[in-house]
Image (spheres, grey):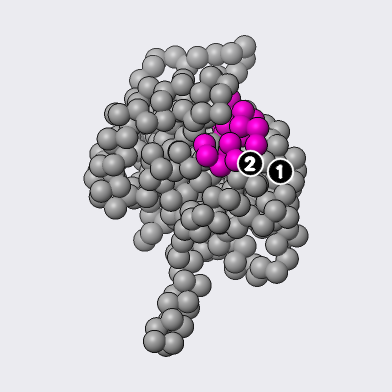
Amino acid sequence: MNNIIVIVLISCVALAQCNREPRFAPYIFLSKSLDFKLVEFHKQHGINAFSLAFALSDNGACKPSWFDNVPIDDPTIVKEIQAFRALGGQLIVSTGGAGGLYLENWCHSVQELTAAYKQVLSVTGATGLDVDVEVSLPLDVVMGALVAIQKENPAITVSFTVPTQGDDYGMNDPYGVDVLKSAAAHGVNVDVVNVMVMDFKTSKPGRSYGEAITKVGEFSVQQMAKIWPQKSEIELYGMLGLTPMLGLNNNQEHFMQSDAQAVVAFAKQKQIGHLGFWSINRDKQCRKVSPKFNGNRVEPDPDCSNVQQQAFEFTDIFNTIFQ
């Protein structure tokens, strides 16, 4: 019996797969349930995990809903989730994001936020909870709720999705490093530090976006080492997540297929813990003849990548992480 326990423990360490986030989970944006085809994506492209974006405050209340105040238990969404999970699919629920009302800012106590998180996890059956930090949050409340969730169910993984400062720096400080320091101080078991490697300028002329993203990853691990000094470099890379934005980024940079290949190669080399991208809704070529402009800027389309590509080409590239 002791030998069996030792073997299991060694397997967990070697594979980093015991009670942890899926290795690859693209974001899927939920609003009016458009393109919410988890089962189809699973069958056609072999995707076994998704990050559901985003669980938000329902109209300024401590009540979770999807974007556009779609009920968290919308029957169409729940039916698709249940069908996907029946096929062995795994789900992460992401809160926060770039827009909308954060649950974390409308649930004013640890108890309230814990209850909201529990409702989201219960409805979706998700095994991971991701806090996407792009605004200031009441960190004591957030961390208290996450500790409570993990205490009640240690199998729930917790990740933080945080912005990039630059490829010569790593994570942003206020919404990245400072948040992680608070998590460590409160005793949150952080499974993945998911860096949004998007919307930043490369620091060197001629550097591809793919190479720049790998540099962000390296600097982020150095930042993480100061927060968790007891962890080895291998363990820290096992905690690292990278999530680029497909095609045209908001700052007019482009993440192309060659960049995706470079990121996957880096992920394999370093054995990073998690890969995602924003978003599977955008993983296709735009049908529109002309893009939408905001002044001199091209607005990234929420439903396509604004670059030439085959449908779900990025998905298929990222999915080679398992090969």
Residue at x-position 70% and y-position 53%: 186
The location of residue 210, given as percent across then percent down, is 56, 46
Q: Earlier in the sequence, mark 2 or mark 1?
A: 2
Question: Which residue does the numbered mark 1 point to in the structure image?
Answer: 140
Q: Are marks 2 and 1 in contact (CB under 8 Å)?
A: yes
For the residues labelled 2 and 1, the Cα–Cα distance comes to 8 Å
Q: Residue at x 71, y 43 (%)?
A: 140
Q: Amino acid at mark 1?
A: Asp
Return the residue at label 2: 110
Query: Label 1: how many residues lie within 10 Å, few (<14), some (14-19) or many (20+)?
Result: few
The range drawn in magenta is: 96-116
> Where does residue 308 sit, x and y in percent of width and height?
41, 31
Residue at image position (46%, 21%) is: 69
| Amino acid, disc 2 | Val
Name the residue nearer the viewer: 68 or 1: 1
Residue 37: x %, y % from top left? 30, 34
Q: Position of residue 64 (x, y in %)?
A: 49, 30
Say if residue 258 shows up in the picture. Answer: no
